[in-house]
Image (cartoon, rainbow, N blue to C red):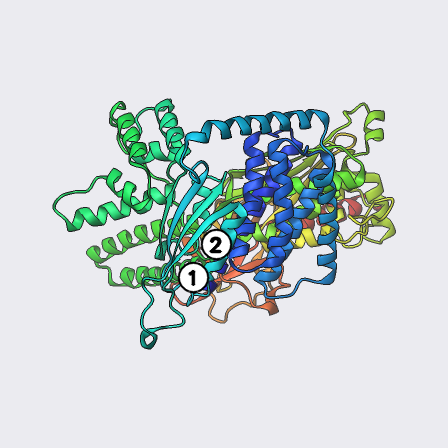
């Protein structure tokens, strides 16, 4: 592994570890202060410090070392993580993330960031230097006495073997060439414990004429006295493991412990490797390497080699431990091998490139369909149909690769809710449901800002203070809910609170004052709620750092609409507010319905289409763009009017207009077109920046015929149809009220 690729791996793993560390710290506040949670937090800091040390990232190592020390004390119970310390540790986690980000982006940390790190270290040192309580001191005394007794019991053990691991290191010859310093591994081993013996072997040093300064010829034999386990020691060599021969011999006392543990394992039906992993004598990575070696040997030699023999030689596992595991295995009945779960990291750009190639395949397939139809050849049409089926399966499989669960995005809001509630002096719980719901990765990234703004508004203005909630007979703790689910080919995300709800009278008064509506105009609750998406409209009584300036909700709606989605509001005064965001599952390749108006091609997303019919066959409401469909009034718009399409010179006379009834959420409308061509797979292409302000169009696509088709933005068109119908109905009502 080269230095650059190793660093990229470090950045990716550090980001994941910091995310897990934050989630575990937040679980402490929920009362989950179990040993596994504490170990997860400690391991995150420990691994980041160790990996950073290998690359000489001293700022990260120095800061994280103090954090690790405090977490180690917390694991031992000598430091109690209260609410204040939890907040400090969360800020330490943020500081570690900032340090990693600076290194990843090749920039120096700012003086302000370094100063904030110093302040955090002072807070941590106050906990580390604080005197221990009597109870803790008593526990420590008992621990020290037990350690002394254990040392006495070990008196008969050969010197230097009680808790000392032996490491035989044969690092790869290209370690120096790849930018790694062998001494950095040795220095980091020193952070795990005490190196009691270090022997450098120079047997492979060549003559001066053959010497290469970039090649590593030295080997090392090391005795390490430590309480760390095999996995922690192996982690030191993560970035050079593939090209090196690293053998780790456990302490003398560990042999008996491993054997006792192997015999006491309650699980049955285990194989040798699984038994050794559960006992702690072997790590999963070591097992996989041994299995690979076994497979190679068994292919090359007639006499197969047993896994136990390879482990004893390659992984330096004592024969007694392997024998105990084999004995335990014989007592367990054979079982069928379980399916092994494997995951790999894939660069996002490679995945996007794959989707683009499949998009081109879809377009080419449509072209082949047209050409095959022109030939009229039955066998060819049958082969093309089969090809189309395979193309759809490939498309669906590729799009699935880009689907991610929304749960990770939801989990980030636990920190926002916690910090904001503390800042506002409120008590707020966050409830999450539907975290397993999946949507396109590219949409998740663009959803973060809109969701953050809605959540902050709910925390600041939606959920009342503790005093107000008591006056209204509510519990002191407010509740914010984030949920997601699939509905009719779309994903629905809901953000709701049990706060005071929207004050429609204040909204109306503010809208009138800003000249947004006529004072005499009667509006429904739905229309009044939609007014909050107008720029500059805010009913907050005071401006805060979080919200209240009237800036943001218009941006939220604009960002949602840019994703071909829509946002609705439901609110009950005194009970709470619900924001419902509805989005398509993906913006890459969709199933569309091909229509045309005045020889201009359009695509309607298939998931929004309900039915199609002749417009003339439906009873119309006089003077309005509305028809009666089985007793339900359906407003409609003509694409030729909306986009001012000029009639073609060779247009066929007396073309019967068709009505395509579409639905998004709970709203329905009709779209009037002239031609219906049917379903088609559609590759979504973004519009040129010059068309970004064009309402009603969300993208474009290339048809198999070579024509360009515009993909309709159905939520915007439905909203436009409803507004036009409401305006026409109001005008008709005023005309009826005028005296004759």
Res. 664 in view: no
Q: Which residue is mark 1?
A: 353
Report x, y in % for residue 46.
Answer: 55, 46
258 versus 235 height, above or below: above
Question: Residue at image x 66%, y 25%?
Answer: 138
Q: Position of residue 527 (x, y in %)?
A: 73, 43
Q: Is residue 566 shown left or right of residue 544?
A: left
User: Is 206 left or right of 98, judged from the image as shown?
Assistant: left
Q: What is the crowding at mark 1: few (fewer than 14 residues within 10 Å), some, or many (at least 20)?
A: few
Name the residue nearer the viewer: 125 or 680. 125
- Secondary structure state at the residue bearing disc 2: helix
State the residue in front, 373 or 729. 373
Residue that appears at 54% across and 48% down: 191
Can residue 350 be seen by looking at this rendering? yes
Q: Where does label 2 land, which residue?
A: 186
User: How far separated are the C-alphas under marks 2 and 1?
Assistant: 42 Å
Residue 136 screen position, x and y as percent: 67, 27
Local SS, label 1: helix
Mark in the foreground, 2 or 1: 2
Q: Is residue 410 left or right of residue 617?
A: right
Q: Residues within 10 Å of mark 2 (few under 14, many from 20)?
A: some
**Observer-nearest residue: 343 or 529?**
343
In-front residue for pair 510/214: 214
Residue 186 placement (x, y as % from top left) = 48, 54
User: In which quarter of the view is residue 43 placed?
Assistant: top right
């Amino acid at each position: 592994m080269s230095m650059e690729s190793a660093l990229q791996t470090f950045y990716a793993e550090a980001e994941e570890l910091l995310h897990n560390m934050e989630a575990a710290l937040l679980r402490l506040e929920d009362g989950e202060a179990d040993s596994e949670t504490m170990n997860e937090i400690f391991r995150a800091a420990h691994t980041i410090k160790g990996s950073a040390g290998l690359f000489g990232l001293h700022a990260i190592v120095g800061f994280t070392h103090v954090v690790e020390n405090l977490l180690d004390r917390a694991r031992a119970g000598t430091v109690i993580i209260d609410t204040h310390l939890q907040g400090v540790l969360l800020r330490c986690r943020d500081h570690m993330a900032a340090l990693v980000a600076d290194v990843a982006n090749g920039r120096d940390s700012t003086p302000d960031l370094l100063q904030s790190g110093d302040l955090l270290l002072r807070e941590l040192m106050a906990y580390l230097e604080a005197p221990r309580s009597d109870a803790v001191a008593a526990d420590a005394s008992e621990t020290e006495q037990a350690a002394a007794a254990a040392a006495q019991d070990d008196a008969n053990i050969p010197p230097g073997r009680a808790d000392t691991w032996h490491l035989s290191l044969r690092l790869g010859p290209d370690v120096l060439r790849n930018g790694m310093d062998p001494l950095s591994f040795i220095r980091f081993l020193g952070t795990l414990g005490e190196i009691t013996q270090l022997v450098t072997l120079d047997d492979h040093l060549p003559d001066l004429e053959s010497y290469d300064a970039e090649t590593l010829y030295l080997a090392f034999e090391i005795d390490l006295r430590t309480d760390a386990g095999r996995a922690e020691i192996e982690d030191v060599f993560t970035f050079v493991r593939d090209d090196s021969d690293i053998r780790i011999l456990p302490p003398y006392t560990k042999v008996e412990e491993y054997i006792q543990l192997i015999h006491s394992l309650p699980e049955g039906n285990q194989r040798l490797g699984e038994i050794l992993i559960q006992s702690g004598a072997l790590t999963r990575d070591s097992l996989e390497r041994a299995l690979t070696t076994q497979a190679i040997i068994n292919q090359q030699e007639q006499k197969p080699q047993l896994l136990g023999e390879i482990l004893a030689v390659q992984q330096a596992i004592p024969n007694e431990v392997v024998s105990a595991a084999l004995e335990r295995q014989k007592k367990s009945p054979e079982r069928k091998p379980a399916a092994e779960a494997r995951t790999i990291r894939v660069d996002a750009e490679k995945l996007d490139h794959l989707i683009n190639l499949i998009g081109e395949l879809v377009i080419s397939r449509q072209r082949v369909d047209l050409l095959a139809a022109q030939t009229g050849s039955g066998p060819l049409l049958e082969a093309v149909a089969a090809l189309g089926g395979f193309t759809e399966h490939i498309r669906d499989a590729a799009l699935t690769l880009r689907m991610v669960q929304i749960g990770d995005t939801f989990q980030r809001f636990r920190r926002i809710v916690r910090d904001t509630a503390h800042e506002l002096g409120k008590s707020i719980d966050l409830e999450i449901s539907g975290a397993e719901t999946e949507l396109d990765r590219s949409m998740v990234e663009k959803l973060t800002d809109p969701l953050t703004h809605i959540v902050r508004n709910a925390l600041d203005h939606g959920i009342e203070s503790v005093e107000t909630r008591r006056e209204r007979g509510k519990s002191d703790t407010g509740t914010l809910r984030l949920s997601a689910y699939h509905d009719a080919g779309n994903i629905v995300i809901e953000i709701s609170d049990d706060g005071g709800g929207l004050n429609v009278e204040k909204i109306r008064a503010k809208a009138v004052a800003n000249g947004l509506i006529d004072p005499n105009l009667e509006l429904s609750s739905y229309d009044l709620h939609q007014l909050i998406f107008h720029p500059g409209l805010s009913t907050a009584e005071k401006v805060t750092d979080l919200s209240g300036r009237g800036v943001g909700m218009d941006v939220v709606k604009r960002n949602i609409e840019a994703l071909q989605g829509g946002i609705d509001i439901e609110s009950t005064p005194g009970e709470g507010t619900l924001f419902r965001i509805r989005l398509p599952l993906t913006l890459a390749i969709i199933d569309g319905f091909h229509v045309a108006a005045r020889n201009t091609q359009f695509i309607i997303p298939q998931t929004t289409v309900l039915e199609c019919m002749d417009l003339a066959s439906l009873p119309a409401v006089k003077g309005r763009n509305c028809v009666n469909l089985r007793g339900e009034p359906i407003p409609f718009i003509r694409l030729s009017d909306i986009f001012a399409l000029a009639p073609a010179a060779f247009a066929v006379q007396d073309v019967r207009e068709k009505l395509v009834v579409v639905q998004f959420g709970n709203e329905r409308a009709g779209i009037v077109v002239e031609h219906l061509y049917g379903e088609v797979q559609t590759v979504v292409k973004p519009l040129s920046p010059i068309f970004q302000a064009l309402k009603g169009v969300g993208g474009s696509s290339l048809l198999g015929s070579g024509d360009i088709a515009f993909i309709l933005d159905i939520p915007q068109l439905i909203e436009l149809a409803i507004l036009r119908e409401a305006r026409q109905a109001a005008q008709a009502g005023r005309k009826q009220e005028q005296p004759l």
